[in-house]
Amino acid sequence: MLANEKPIAITMGDPSGIGPEIILKALNSAEPLPSCVVIGDLTVIESALAIYQPQMKLNVVAHPREVRHQQGIVNLLVSSQLDKHPRVGQVQGDSGKVAFKAILKAIELAKNGEVAAVVTAPINKESLNLAKVPYPGHTEIFADYGGADDVAMMLLNESIKTVLVTVHCSLRNAIEQADFNAQCRAIELAHNACIQFGIPAPRIAVAGLNPHAGENGLFGDEEKNIITPAIEYAKGKGINVSGPWPGDTVFMQAREGRFDIVVAQYHDQGLIPVKYMGLDEGVNVTLGLPFIRTSPDHGTGFDIAGKGIASPSSLLASIRCAHQLSQNRDTLNQLEESHHEF
């Protein structure tokens, strides 16, 4: 396993889904991993261990510094303790409640600098709603509790990186929310994200909102009145950005190497190209936070929960990505400190 000064926090996700299963499978894989600590419910993790990985041993810790970086050990920082394990494969308020508690604890640790990054297992929006948690997803929770003014969702796999201008809302609302400020924010966050991934001069493509990127106003004027001015503004700040490009071809060009990252206007425009290439290596990154947060590019898997067949591949990719970003961030911070000394 890889040495790491601070562990990566992994939230357990919705306990009625595949989160606990894929976490334990990932931690017991043959792949060398950085030091990790699971944040979650004691009853849930003990039950999952007995079912999925009975050969592994549980190490309950009160603080991340107590983590034992050792194969076959599951380090758990307890954020709740249910009387019994929730029913698997079903939407339940108790599951949403304890999943939310684990997220809040991980955010607290990350903001205090006690973990290197946060990786979140999938949650269920209906379960959160039953628990009276008023958020549609992780991104919005991290935006409110993570200490960031602006956040954006980034999806990536081995071939494509994309940042979304708008996230979880109706298509009608996405059109309204994709204003000049939202465009500028997404472009800047995409630029900064590429820097963190070790791309020193990223080439950013901005997708159009309308078919054929508006066709010079024939199919809509958002490109001419909103997106193009935002691109020009970003260029004035030294960002290498171009567009707006037709949404039906820009991802193909990125995959072929013309662009390093694509700024997509709405949820499905950006996520369909990434997910079409498979969920095994897909990773979700929340940009704009003062710490690193990644997650698998799939949901809670209620249809296969409890069957022991869920794949940890996307979670492993998320852990690798979080580790890479934390290592790069440490390197960038060291370079900045060296620069200030002169």
Image (tube, helix red, strand yellow):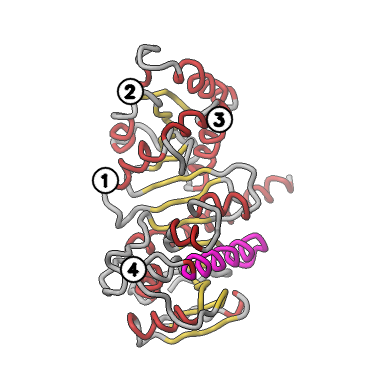
Characterize the local packing of mark 1: few (<14), some (14-19) or many (20 or more) Cα atoms within 10 angstroms: few
Q: CA distance from mark 2 to mark 1?
A: 20 Å
The amino acid sitting under disc 3 is Cys
Q: Which residue is mark 1?
A: 276
Q: Which residue is mark 3?
A: 184
Q: CA distance from mark 4 to mark 2?
A: 39 Å
Q: Residue at (46%, 36%) from the top-left corner?
A: 202
Residue 315's place in the image compared with 39, above or below, is: above
- Specify whether residue 264 is in view: no
Q: Which residue is mark 2?
A: 211
Q: Position of residue 307 (x, y in %)?
A: 26, 74
SS for dot 1: helix
Between circles 3 and 4, the one closer to the viewer is 4
Q: Earlier in the sequence, mark 2 or mark 3?
A: 3
Task: Give, as a single range, the part of the protein colored magenta.
Answer: 94-116
Q: Position of residue 183 (x, y in %)?
A: 52, 30
**Which label number is shown at residue 75?**
none
Place residue 65 in its image quadrant: bottom right
Characterize the local packing of mark 3: few (<14), some (14-19) or many (20 or more) Cα atoms within 10 angstroms: many
Q: Residue furthest right?
A: 341
Q: Residue at (43%, 79%) from the top-left corner?
A: 85
Dominant SS of magenta comes to helix
Q: Earlier in the sequence, mark 4 or mark 1?
A: 4
Q: Which residue is mark 4?
A: 89
Whether residue 101 is in magenta: the answer is yes
Residue 151's place in the image compared with 75, above or below, is: above
Is 238 on the left or on the right of 298, as rendered?
right
Q: Earlier in the sequence, mark 3 or mark 4?
A: 4
Q: Nearer the viewer, residue 101 or 22?
A: 101
